Amino acid sequence: MAQLIKLQDYISRYEQNIFVYPSRYVRLKKRQWEKLLAVWEMGERLAVSGDELSLSVWEEENKEPFLDKVKGLFQREKEEEQTEILSGAFSVPGENNEVSFLFSPAFKNRPATVEDLKQQFLNQLFPFQIKWASATLTEKSFVDNKFYQDPVLKYFLQRFPDTFLVLYKPIFLVKKAPIEAEPVIITPTEIWCIRFLEQEDSAVYLGSPGHFWIKRIQKREEKVLNPLISLNRTEKIIKNILQMCAIDLPVHKVVLSRNGYFDYPFAPVDVQFIEKRNYEQWFRMMRSQRSPLKHIQLKAARALLDFCQTTSIPRHEWKLSEE
């Protein structure tokens, strides 16, 4: 599950220390998944033995997180490490161990398969990720509710590896002017600027150098804004920042349509057009990257975050502590 390090102009803990939080998040997520999977597998075995009492953790009327009921079963890590990961640097005055950042999945019904369990885990982790990425020890931002239902954001976060760092519609300050960019993914070895172009199924987009493209659906045609305009602007911003910071990472541009097609005979050679016919191949290539987080990747992320606009307010708990 990719990491959301910047959402528009909301505050981000990754801005404070990009070299700490990515690995910390991966450990937190991995530990919770392993615990959840262990409980699920235990329930599977107990179901065969007929131990109905132990399976009551999955009953519909149960209102408490089921992991609380098996507390103490999994003591593989030391208490100090748990504190460092689940609370530690995230403690806020007035809150015990920063409970608001403790992710504990809880289901009313027992998922039938491991895949169902994994998808429910990811679905519950998604809103946690947004909260995790939009608050710090002393500040927070008010996230628009639309992002919690944003299918493209969920796609980026749920379908790519943990080592991918995502800036979703970041707002860069270019000569003090705010400019919203396309989504950016920083992988351990490269940077991807991605422009989604998905509307009706099987739509055909006729590309051209002009300000508008033509979208053809059966016998109907409509004008759509040329996606390369914003994509090229995003690439230029990213490359300028990397150059200023002496960071050497390749930058790729992609126009992506999982449900449509492109017809652009003289398309620019520096842009990849990923459509319905070649999407699976590109997607498998992206997911197959197994490199760990790299120092140059984190340096690039820090450089980009330094040029992002941030809008936030002091946390209420912190203000009360100061008073």
Image (cartoon, helix red, strand yellow):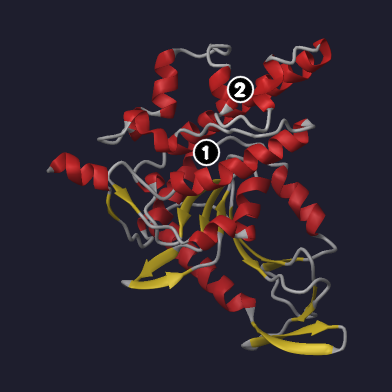
Question: Which residue is drawn at the image coordinates 58% and 71% (left, top)?
Answer: 231
Q: Quadrant of residue 109?
A: top right
Amino acid, disc 2 = Lys
Question: Which residue is drawn at the image coordinates 70% and 48% (left, top)?
Answer: 286
**Which one is earlier in the sequence, the residue at label 1 or at label 2?**
2
User: Quick check: 313 left or right of 109?
Assistant: left
Q: Secondary structure at mark 2?
A: helix
Split into 4 quadrants, where in the image is the C terminus? top left
Question: Which residue is drawn at the image coordinates 57% and 23% (left, top)?
Answer: 67
Q: Which residue is mark 2?
A: 35
In terms of depth relative to the viewer, which is nearer, 59 or 279? 59
Q: Quadrant of residue 87?
A: top left
Q: CB atoms at circles 1 and 2 under 8 Å apart?
A: no
- Of labels 1 and 2, the one closer to you: 2
Q: Which residue is mark 1?
A: 294
| Residue 140 visible somewhere in the drawing | yes
Q: CA distance from mark 1 to mark 2?
A: 27 Å
